[in-house]
């Protein structure tokens, strides 16, 4: 019995001594820089691609139906990058931002919509929404 007690005290004492030392942290692995520049994902570059813009708009409309207005805003914004002349993308971006509660973003999107499509059938509705509240 005395042997077990001595062994327990020795283990406890050794644990206390070891616990006073700072724990050794393993080194953080650092990845070497990528040699193939085509694989580096820095800033996404957009080219004129109306088909990709239409895909983004469809996905954005799905998110609108689902009630994810911030996700929809992101998709419509992405669509406007793929096709800067897409009045539909900018109009839907304004609607999504309005429902998400982003008033400044909504106004910016709809002002851009009026620049792109001043003769659109939705232009009168947008102009009314952009008028200051009296």
Image (cartoon, helix red, strand yellow):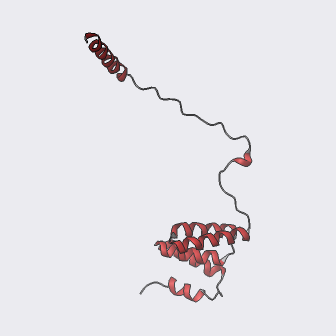
Q: Is residue 8 above or below residue 126?
A: above
Q: Is residue 125 above or below residue 69?
A: below
- Residue drawn 61% across the image and 79% down it: 113
Residue 79 at x, y = what percent? 65, 69
- In this view of the protein, which residue sits in the foreground, 36 or 132? 36
Q: Residue at x 65, y 78 (%)?
A: 87
Q: Quadrant of the C terminus?
A: bottom left
Q: Position of residue 39 (x, y in %)?
A: 71, 47
Please tell me which residue is depicted at 59% across the width and 74% down the height of the picture: 61
Residue at the far top in the pictured view: 3
Q: Which residue of the protein is positioned furthest toward the front in this rendering?
A: 1
The image quadrant where one finds the N terminus is top left
Is 16 placed left or right of 104 in the picture?
A: left
Q: Position of residue 24 (x, y in %)?
A: 46, 26
* Residue depicted at x 35% and y 22%: 20
Q: Is residue 132 above or below residue 45?
A: below
Q: Foreground residue, 92 or 8?
A: 8
Q: How many marks?
A: 0
To which quarter of the image does residue 3 belong?
top left
């Amino acid at each position: 019995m005395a042997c077990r007690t001595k062994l327990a005290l020795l283990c406890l004492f050794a644990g206390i001594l070891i616990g006073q030392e700072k724990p050794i942290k393993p080194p953080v692995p650092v990845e070497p820089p990528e040699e193939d520049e085509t694989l580096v994902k820095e800033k996404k570059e957009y080219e004129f691609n109306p088909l990709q813009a239409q895909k983004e708009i469809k996905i954005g409309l799905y998110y609108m139906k689902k009630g994810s207005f911030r996700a929809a805003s992101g998709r419509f914004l992405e669509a406007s990058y793929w096709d800067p002349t897409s009045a539909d993308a900018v109009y839907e971006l304004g609607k999504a931002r309005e429902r998400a509660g982003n008033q400044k973003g909504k106004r910016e999107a709809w002002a851009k919509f009026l620049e792109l499509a001043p003769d659109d059938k939705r232009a009168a509705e947008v102009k009314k929404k952009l008028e200051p509240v009296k």
